[in-house]
Image (cartoon, helix red, strand yellow):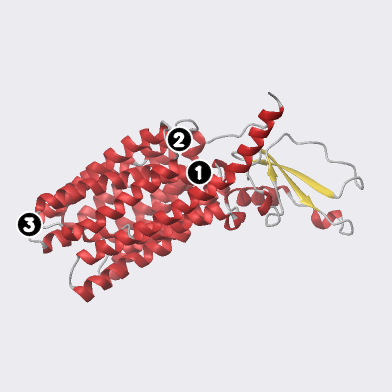
Amino acid sequence: MDHLHYGGHDLYPPLASVLSACFSHRAVVIIGGLICSLGVIAGSFSDNLIELCVTVGFLNGVGYALSWIPTVTILSFYFEKKRPLANALSTTGECIFTFVLTPLFQVLINAYTWRGALLCLGGLQLLLCVCGVLLRPLRASKNEAFVSEVTTEEQGFVQQTLLLEPSEPKPPLGQESAVIQTCEAPDVGNVTVQLEEPEEQSLKESRCTPKTSEFMAKVLRYMDYSLITNANFMVFTMFGVFSCLGLFAPVLFLVPYARSKGVQEHHAALLVSISAALDLLGRIVFGWVANLRLIQAVKQLTATVLLQGILLLLFPLASSYIELVALSAAYGLTFGATVSIHITVLSEVVGVHRLGSALGFFMLIRSGGGLLGPPIAGLLIDRTGDYGTAFLMAGVAFIISTMFLLALHCMNTRGQKPTLNVSLNQTEQNP
């Protein structure tokens, strides 16, 4: 069920980006909250495992994707100087919810059975709609720069460039080989779309209606397909694939692994709460550290992911409950540090104006790792009869993912050298 939930969550971010462009972030978050609530409430009436997987698993995951993607995207537009800290604080809610809901859900099951507990949870998820209402729409200024920042290498891939600028008078016919169409977009102001027209093609064929121009402007803003030609973005995406491959092992197998070591069920479940509490602390502390700009965000992310991999490799060596508590706490701290900074690194890789589209593609591609991770871990457990092999697989996957972060750092450093040399030459010429 968790597998289907995270599959729906990772497969539908591009759809969330397009819907945000067409209907606004606020509307999509509200729709996502309704789908989440509907899925869990419908799950309370399920009569078999398949219905439960479709409702509580997949449908709830789709609703979560529709709620999460627009929220993260619009948050990056709200903040600039304190964006790392804002991203970190915005993700602390799931830690608090995990820490509180784990014992609360068991209480609800004891009082109302699992069906009643799901009904209560579905009603609670309606609060996502309230959160969506509180999202303040942003209107771009008329002198704002390009919406899509396309590099020189990508210009051949994208045929249309969207500008946010005041509408200008249409040039006389015959003087220019382009048709300029100005539309009024709901949340971004005036959008001017320039469509290149061959000389031999009639103006009638190339002229677009206002509705078509508005739709294309919105779709191209959030579905920037030129990202697949961006080497830095694709390297970061491969980091996401391998890190997601080992992401779910602690969540799915921590309690069964502790039980296999002779730990009582209550104490084994407490390990998840301890990890969630330290996860919360890690997001706040390391989000604040990232906001200080003491080191590059990609370096901080590399260090925390590497520590995660090492800690996962140490789990099979734990032989007592105290050691499991220490490892769970340390893993929760490093996990929180990773979650608090990876969105910030992505925005630095592609630029904040392309974050909506980049986040959609990033989560779609990395879903391959998320979908393959649990089955591979389960296969290893079935073959060896030891839950520790799942942690070994996850640790190796995290360590491999750091190789892509190191490659990204090298690419960034190599790309900055020409700019640095030009600046030094200018300084020497103008003492």
Q: CA distance from mark 1 to mark 3?
A: 44 Å
Give the farthest residue toward the bottom.
383
Residue 264 disc label: 3
Q: Secondary structure at mark 1?
A: helix
| Residue 396 point in image, percent of width and height | 32, 61
Dot 3 amino acid type: Gln
Distance from label 2 to label 1 (Cα)?
10 Å
Callout 2 secondary element: helix
Looking at the image, which residue is at 59% across and 39% down? Answer: 187
| Image depth: mark 1 or mark 3 in front | 1
Give the spatial CA distance, label 2 vs label 3: 42 Å
- The spot of residue 196 in percent (x, y) is 79, 52
Amino acid type of the residue that numbered disc 2 sits on in the rendered structure:
Arg
- Can residue 59 be seen? no
Q: Which residue is pictured at 58% across the width and 58% down the height?
A: 228
Q: Check contact, mark 1 vs mark 3: CB within 8 A.
A: no
| 369 relative position to 262: left or right | right
Q: Is residue 184 above or below residue 258?
A: above
Name which of mark 2 and mark 3 comes first in the sequence.
2
Graded by Cα atoms within 10 Å as few (under 14), some (14 to 19) or many (20 or more), the crowding at tag 3 reads some
Query: Which residue in the structure is indicated by mark 1?
Result: 347
Instruction: Name which quarter of the figure residue 299 lies in.
Output: top left
**Disc number for residue 83:** 2
Q: Identify the secondary structure beneath mark 3.
A: loop
Amino acid type assigned to the residue bearing label 1 in the image: Ser
Mark 1 / mark 3, whichever is N-terminal: 3
- Left or right? Give the position of 214 relative to 332: right
Quadrant into which the C terminus falls: top right
Confirm or deny contact between disc 2 and disc 3 (CB under 8 A). Answer: no
At a point 67% along the width and 32% down the height, the residue shown is: 142
Q: Residues within 10 Å of mark 2 (few under 14, many from 20)?
A: many
